[in-house]
Image: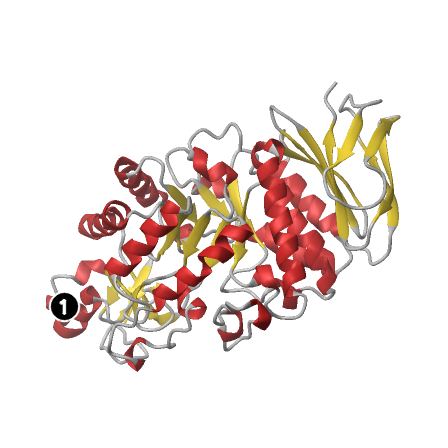
Amino acid sequence: MENISYIPEWVKNSTIYHIYPFGFFGAPKFGDMESETTPRLELIRKFYPHFDELGINVVQFGPIFESVSHGYDTTDFMKIDHRLGSNDLFKEIVEELHQRNIRVIVDGVFNHVGRNFNSFKDVQKYKEKSWRLHWHFIDFNSNNPFNDGFDYKNWEGHYSLVKLNLLEPDVREYIFSVSEYWLREIGIDGWRLDVAYQIPRTFWREFRKKCKTIKPDCFLIGEMIHGPYGKWVGPDLLDAGTGYQVNKSIWSGFNSNNLYELKAVLEQNFNPNFGLNKGILLVNFLGNHDLTRIRSQLSNENSLFPAFLFLFTTNGLPKIYYGDEIGLKGEKTETSDDSVRQMMILKKDDWPDRGQEIFDHVKLCIRLRKAHHSLQYGNLTSLYADDSTIAFLRKSSKETMLIVLSASENTKSCSIPLWNLNLDGRFFQEQLTQGGKKEYRVVKNKLFIDELYPSWGRVLKLVEN
């Protein structure tokens, strides 16, 4: 990340805290369940001390605009959902977070809208005579499940999500005006862009230009579930993409006692010489609003500790899904996301078992990353893996760190190969407070660790000569 010049500098030492607003604030599932504007967003003020203690410096609000239900079926991009509050209230909150040195990112769902969006309602009413017909992909030779008398393109078969025609100039200009309003008038610092991989790069090229003209240091994250990331991320496109492959490899590697899988993903993505994404910023995470929570996903919940250590020592930008930092549980099912979108718990007395222990560990991980230049800016070279151990190197212009993580339930030893790194005879010093040696010497191009504690790790800094 050190040499990626098109990413705003403030991003590089950031930790994102991801909120799904309708869940976090306990809003009704459907907008028509209450007609009055309810200022649930005010509740976030009670969490300011939580954010400060945790050490995060970016809050990402998931879909927050007026919608029918979950937020991705938008009915008005220019208005905060009435279940959450008003534009004025949200602007106040953005200003308050800025005063605490916390940036704000908002979900932009620009691929599709809800059926109550004004352009689609115009098509429903006037059919072929609608002046907004070109805003969508309409087929009058077929019908749809709602019996509108026409068919239309939607998101992956979900007819409640109507695809926008972003190839049309006036549709693009409308979306650009939406972005300008929230960046300029409300003061947000960037966008997390839903299903960015389904939107033409020509649109993102224009979108970036418009956003950066308004706020040059705004941050643009594209939701991407696969590569090639370079198709959507770059100096004239989006700033970053979401690391779904990394996410899957974390819990899968721990659960299957197969950290070779995680090493292979690191090698494929981040090798400084041939990694597919060596010059691309990925936003990495252990969970989000669409996934089973990490504590429920792991077969051994003690693996939470090396998993969080990995998140904050690996390449890319770390993101925490609200509640994971206190060990909330929740399983996504084929029919419901409710248990992973529950209301956030404010009082520590009501936290789940081990909640304080998990919270303290996440705090430690955030402080660790902030304290080390290489963990924020450095390249990543994967070095070693066995069933329950993974080791990788982070190197920046200012320091070199060696990270060794264990998913084993027993204390173990391991020998890390450091070939072709010219480190023979050099020393690494432990950066975590724990038992065992505080200093390790490279002997014959290997570093031997005799005590790697259960579900834990060693974070070692190269001593400069």
Q: Nearer the viewer, residue 173 or 344?
A: 344
Circle 1 crowding by C-alpha within 10 Å: few under 14, some 14–19, many from 20: some
Which residue: 25% across, 59% down? 87
Q: Taking 221 as reference, is 273 above or below it?
A: above
Would residue 191 be seen by someone viewing this image from the given angle? no
- Tell me which corner region of the image, top left, top right, bottom left or bottom right, holds residue 436: top right
| Amino acid of disc 1 | Glu
Question: Is 271 placed left or right of 237 in the picture?
Answer: right
How has the structure been colored for display?
Answer: secondary structure
Q: Taking 387 as reference, is 74 above or below it?
A: below
Q: Nearer the viewer, residue 114 or 424?
A: 424
Question: Is 327 placed left or right of 427 in the picture?
Answer: left
- Tell me which corner region of the image, top left, top right, bottom left or bottom right, holds residue 39: bottom left
Return the x and y of residue 353 as percentages of the image width and height.
66, 70
For the image, the number of numbered tags is 1
As drawn, which residue projects farthest toward the top? 465
Return the x and y of residue 280 as percentages of the image width and height.
51, 37
Question: Is 59 placed left or right of 282 in the picture?
Answer: left
Which residue: 32% across, 40% down? 208
Return the x and y of residue 374 as percentages of the image width and height.
62, 32
Instruction: Give the labeled residue for mark 1.
Output: 128
Which residue: 31% across, 81% down? 33
SS at mark 1 in the image:
helix
Return the x and y of residue 106 as percentages of the image width and height.
37, 54
Which residue: 43% across, 48% down? 222
- Tell me which corner region of the image, top left, top right, bottom left or bottom right, holds residue 23: bottom left
Q: Quadrant of the C terminus?
A: top right
Q: Nearer the viewer, residue 463 or 50?
A: 50
Q: Taking 352 as reference, is 424 above or below it?
A: above
Would residue 337 be seen by someone viewing this image from the given angle? yes
